[in-house]
Amino acid sequence: MTQDSANDATTHEKPKKVIVITDADAVVLEKKLRLGQSICNLGYVALLVMLTLNYLLSSDIKLMHLVVTILPLAIFIPSLRRPHHRTYSWLCFVLLMYFLFLVPLLMSYWSATYWILTLLVTVLFITAMMTSRWLQYWNYYLSTKKSASN
C-alpha cells in the first residue's frame, strides 16, 4: 500500500460515535439494569427449578439426563453473583441451545411443560441480552465519571 492509498483509507473512515450518558440518563439506566438483573436471576432460578421438576416427574429417570440438562446452566451460578456483561452474553448463547431443543419438542408434543420451558427460556434470553447491554452502558458511565473526577 502506498502512502497516498493509506491516507485515502483513513479519510474515508467514519468517525467513532461518542456516547454521552448524562446523570439523568444514568438514573434511568440503573433502574433498568437492576430490574433486568432481578428478572434475569428470577428467570434463571425458575428455569433450573422447572428443568429439575421436569426430570423428577418424568418416567425415564436417569441421573445423566439431569446432569446434561442442568450443567450448562449451572456453570453460570458463580458468575451471576458477580455480574459482568460477558456472563449475560454467554448465557444467551447457552440459552439458544435450550431453545433449539425445546421448540421441536413443543411442536411435536404440545405439552404445557414445554410451553412453560420455552417461555422461560425466551424471557431469560431477552432479559439477559438487554441486561448485558445495560451493564455495558453502566460500566461506561462509571468509567467516564471516574476519568472526569481525576
Image (tube, rainbow, N blue to C red):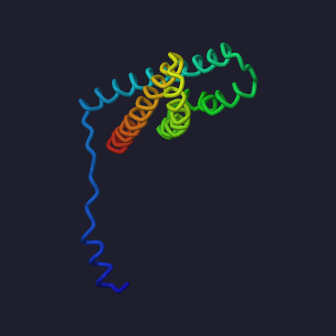
Farthest residue, direction bottom: 2
Along the line of sight, the residue nearer the viewer: 106 or 8: 106
Along the line of sight, the residue nearer the viewer: 84 or 100: 100
Quarter occupied by residue 47? top right
Q: Position of residue 60 (x, y in %)?
A: 72, 20
Write the residue at 27% across / 50% down.
Answer: 18
Q: Is residue 57 left or right of residue 87?
A: right
Q: Is residue 120 left or right of residue 72?
A: left
Along the line of sight, the residue nearer the viewer: 141 or 126: 126
Q: Position of residue 150 (x, y in %)?
A: 36, 44
Along the line of sight, the residue nearer the viewer: 17 or 105: 105
Write the residue at 48% across / 39% down.
Answer: 89
Quarter occupied by residue 53? top right
Q: Is residue 144 left or right of residue 88?
A: left
Q: Is residue 134 left or right of residue 111?
A: left
User: Number of marks in the image?
Assistant: 0
Residue 13's place in the image compared with 87, above or below, is: below
Residue 103's place in the image compared with 3, above or below, is: above
Write the residue at 59% across / 21% down.
Answer: 48
Q: Position of residue 14 (x, y in %)?
A: 26, 62
Residue 17's place in the image compared with 74, above or below, is: below
Farthest residue, direction front: 108
Quadrant of the snapshot with the N terminus:
bottom left
Write the residue at 41% across / 31% down.
Answer: 126
